[in-house]
Amino acid sequence: MVGGYWSGTSNVTWADGSKSTDKYTCVSTSQPTNAKIFDSHVICDGTNSQGTYSAVFGCQFTSKDMQSTGCVGGLTGRTGKYAGMGGTITFAGRGGTGSGTGTWSKPTN
């Protein structure tokens, strides 16, 4: 098993065209070859001026050199405008850069 830790910023463009810069901190761990759905699991905590949230991903390496990855996961709102919200998220990238999509939904209860 191999793990990782990193932090940084991401530029977000919302459906209404507004933009934000989010700060994030992430940890990951590889999964055992005999008992896995994904090559790695990743959890990130994010923050911007409107609140905080967490993203949990399952990721697959998409290249033989293991530098490209594709991920799917869920979002959990923590504070601010995200409190009580959930959603889905995707990511694809190579060598530490990439892009993805996220969708937030209001709680039903």
Image (cartoon, rainbow, N blue to C red):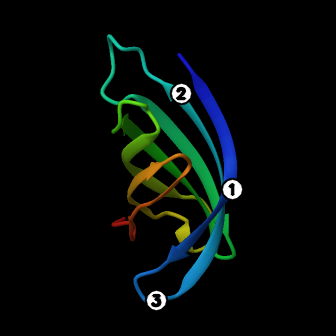
Amino acid bearing label 3: Gly
Q: Which residue is mark 2?
A: 29
Q: Quadrant of residue 35?
A: top left
| Residue type highlighted by circle 1 | Gly
**Which quarter of the figure has residue 16?**
bottom left
Q: Secondary structure at mark 3?
A: loop
Comparing 33 with 108, the one in front is 33
- Circle 3/circle 1 CB separation < 8 Å: no
Above or below — where is 42 with respect to 90?
above
Closer-to-camera residue (49/58): 58
Q: Which residue is mark 3?
A: 17
Of mark 2 and mark 1, the one earlier in the sequence is 1
Instruction: Give the CA separation, mark 3 to mark 1.
Output: 22 Å
Residue 17, compared with residue 99, is above or below; it is: below
Report how far apart the C-alphas of labels 3 and 2 lie in the structure. 34 Å
- Identify the residue shown where x is 39% and y is 38%: 58
Secondary structure of residue under mark 1: strand
**Residue 90, image x, y percentages:** 37, 55
Position in image of residue 32 (x %, y %): 41, 14
State the mark number for residue 83. none
Query: The C terminus appears in which quarter of the rendering?
Result: bottom left
Callout 2 amino acid: Thr
Q: Is residue 14 left or right of residue 90?
A: right
Mark 2: which secondary structure? Answer: strand
Asked if 19 appears above or below 61 in the picture, the reply is: below
Classify mark 3: residues with Cα within 10 Å, few (<14), some (14-19) or many (20+): few
Residue to which mark 1 is pinned? 8
